[in-house]
Amino acid sequence: MQSMFSNLSERLTKVLKNLSGRGRLTEDNIRETMRDIRMALLEADVALPIVKDFVEQIQVKAIGAEVMDSLTPGQALIKIVHDDLVVLMGAQCDTLNLQTQPPAVILMAGLQGSGKTTTTAKLARWLKQNQKKSILLVSADIYRPAAILQLEALARQVEVEFFPSQTNQDPVFIAQSAIQHAKSKLIDVVIIDTAGRLHIDDEMMAEIKRLHAAIHPIETLFVVDSMTGQDAANTSKAFNDALPLTGVILTKTDGDARGGAALSIRQITGKPIKFIGVGEKIDAIEPFYPDRIASRILGMGDVVSLVEEVERNIDRDKAEKLAKKIKKGKSFDLEDFRDQLRQVGKMGGIMGIMSKLPGIGNLPAAAKDKINDKMLFEIEAIINSMTPKERRFPAIIKGSHKRRIASGSGTDIQAVNRLLKQFTMMQKMMKKFSKQGGILKLMRGLQGKIPGGFGGFGGFGGGGLPPT
């Protein structure tokens, strides 16, 4: 997620930061700012007509009394940019509509290579985990036997039911048979994966129109690759002109996309982005919240999503045990530390967490480059190279121990020393968290603030501590 908007975020944050400190705004410096915002959006591959309207609207509001007479005009302008970005992307999160006699049928469509089949499985997992739905997956892609096998393997991976299909069957027959099967088994949701094409063609549209008319899905979702920028929005529109879409899923937002798709789709198609794919892992999908995305673009962070992710991913049993252990005055040891690092990995790694923290966009690029998930692997390798006694009592680790640990983990003594130093900081923070009411309370307190004292792993290790 951070990748898609990182350049745009950097540009806009810099532009607006220049304004925020000014005691007053003039029409000249507002126009200059609008020029910079226009360039940032065009470089992000947002469609020109959308950029033009967006900048004009902000300029009208910025020159109005609301900003010019404000005590903090720079901040008032930032709020306008934020609010208009939210409107541009659709104002609110549009959830899936499953309000129908079960099974609710979801039809997945998209071009070849958009990540449609993987997204189908991700969506199934999300509905199972978050809405406690029973799911049936079926492939109506009769042109690629590999697509059917891929979906079957993914269904096993996410532990949902799969309805078998063959390449010599008619897609309508496959879909209708799967829906009938779901009815007989009282399954809540049927998700139908369809054939992708290299481009939108008459044959593809005729087939999917026939399929749509036969099964009347409650949701028809177009899966599109965000890497294609504003072309993603144009492809979605062409598809929507032929078939009534209910929403879009934007994939590969963790790649080197520029953000143009997310900012253009709603305006060009009139249809909401309902989900975004945020990585290759099977759980890397999240609902699209325009207000949260706008906050991330402007460097304000997204602590709400981060808290939700912590609550979703922490191991409650381990967290409770750790909280009780620290409350009793027992020391937080390196085995506990390793558990905490694994929880960080479950939440999308360090950058996954950092991208949602306010103020991260203001870190120098060199500092951001140093922060990566290789550190997690290195630290776990070092801890794994210790004896159980050393993990429980790190104070006993001296010179000869350090040489053995460094050799066993493929690192050096400096790396071992660095870990022990970070661990000592963590021990202190753990004591503090247990007194303050846990990591979730701490994170909620971060909302709208720039984090301080963000060194090493000090900000992450409490990922498993519940409120106490």
Image (cartoon, helix red, strand yellow):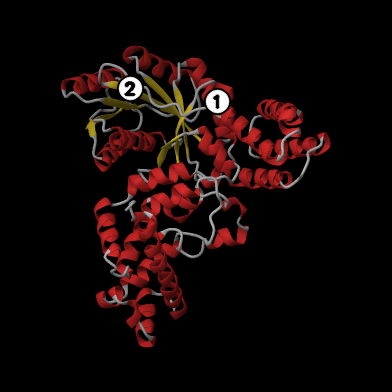
Going 37% across and 35% down the picture, which residue do you hit? 117
Going 36% across and 69% down the picture, which residue do you hit? 381
Residue 426, above or below 97 = below
Q: Residues within 10 Å of mark 2 (few under 14, many from 20)?
A: some
Taking depth in this image into account, of 83 and 115 the one nearest to the observer is: 83
Tell me the residue that label 1 is attached to. Answer: 266
Label 1 and label 2: CA atoms lie apart by 21 Å
Q: Secondary structure at mark 1?
A: helix
Check contact, mark 1 vs mark 2: CB within 8 A.
no
Going 68% across and 40% down the picture, which residue do you hit? 40
User: Where residue 310 sits: x, y (%)?
Assistant: 37, 48
Say which mark, if any, is on residue 98.
Answer: 2
Q: Does residue 348 appear in this view? A: no
When asked about the image quadrant of residue 365, the answer is: bottom right
Q: Is residue 260 left or right of residue 426?
A: right
User: Where residue 458 sits: x, y (%)?
Assistant: 45, 63
Whichever of labels 1 and 2 marks the residue nearer the N terminus, that label is 2
User: Where residue 287 sits: x, y (%)?
Assistant: 43, 34
Taking depth in this image into account, of 118 and 464 the one nearest to the observer is: 464
Q: Amino acid at mark 2?
A: Leu
